[in-house]
Image: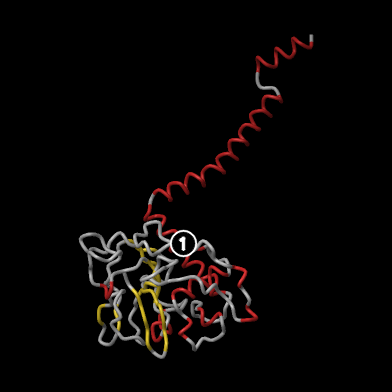
Amino acid sequence: MQRQDERIRRRHGFSRQDLLAVLVTLMVLFVLAALLLPLLTYQRVGQNPMVREGVQLRGIYQSIQIMSEDFAGDRYVTPAQVLQRETESSLNTTASFYSMMIMQNYFSPNLVISRRESNPRVREMTDYDWDLFDPAEGIRWDDAFQADLTTTSNTSYAHLLLHGARLDRHWRTADTAHVPLLGNRGPRDGVPDASSYTCDDRGRWHDQMVVTADGASHRNMSMTPANLTYGDPPQPDNVFAMEDGPEGEDVILTFTKEIRDGRVVIQHD
């Protein structure tokens, strides 16, 4: 009689065991989907160099924002500010700028290396020494981190020159959204150059990425954006040319090798 009842239940619908098995199967499928979808998304990003470039640059920008929140004021953080020596802009080189954020784990050394890097002198620093960190002794970054495009650079990305009126006017959290703060490097003086690592074989600066003050990434922005000017009367601003002198206010994205006694040494390749 019992066997007959079981056969009747099976003919007329699912048993409790059947329903439980279906629920367990669905849960396993949901878990697998949750695990696989991020991996598939990451793979698609990795296969698209320009998408990856934008992700890296926005990651650097967001790290600057987060680190800046740890220091009072309306200016984005600088190496001089971290050492509480804000008047010493000589500390604000490209090497110390990126190295200070790596030291405090805002991002890893590989984030500042473009997957499209063509200059053989630019390579990831694989032996960064976090053990050097000693705020009491004023050690906030690894000085072995380099940003010299003529010898060795451990970063691919240019940033706003952190000195003079540029620092005071543009390196602020409340700045206008269209001002470029960091991005791919450009040719010297913003002049198209087929011999530059930053241009194609026809001398064009294209398929490049820039991040503006609002955190947006822009592909193929002109070296002289239509909405970017400096001076009075306003003049077009080339983002890779120092048009207003070392202390000036025009935007320039560059590598800063040295700032000393009013002398600024910048690099392009």
Asked if residue 175 is positioned above or below residue 206 in the image, the reply reads below
Query: Tag 1, which secondary structure?
Result: loop
- Nearer to the camera, 113 or 3: 113
Label 1: how many Cα within 10 Å (few below 14, some 14–19, many 20+)? many
- Nearer to the camera, 217 or 203: 203
Please, which residue is most extreme toward the front here?
A: 151
| Residue at image location 42% in from the left, 80% down from the top | 162
Q: Which residue is mark 1?
A: 124
Pinpoint residue 269: horizontal percent, then vertical percent.
31, 69
- Nearer to the camera, 263 or 36: 263
| Residue at image location 28% in from the left, 61% down from the top | 206
| Residue at image location 67% in from the left, 27% down from the top | 19
Q: Quadrant of the N terminus?
A: top right
Q: Is residue 73 left or right of residue 12?
A: left
Q: Name the colour scheme.
A: secondary structure
Q: Quadrant of residue 27?
A: top right
Pinpoint residue 228: horizontal percent, then vertical percent.
30, 75
Pinpoint residue 83: horizontal percent, then vertical percent.
56, 82
Asked if residue 160 is positioned above or below residue 31 in the image, the reply reads below
Question: Total marks drawn?
Answer: 1
Identity, as a three-letter code, of the amino acid under mark 1: Glu
Asked if residue 269 is positioned above or below residue 54 in the image, the reply reads below
Asked if residue 258 is positioned above or below residue 152 in the image, the reply reads below
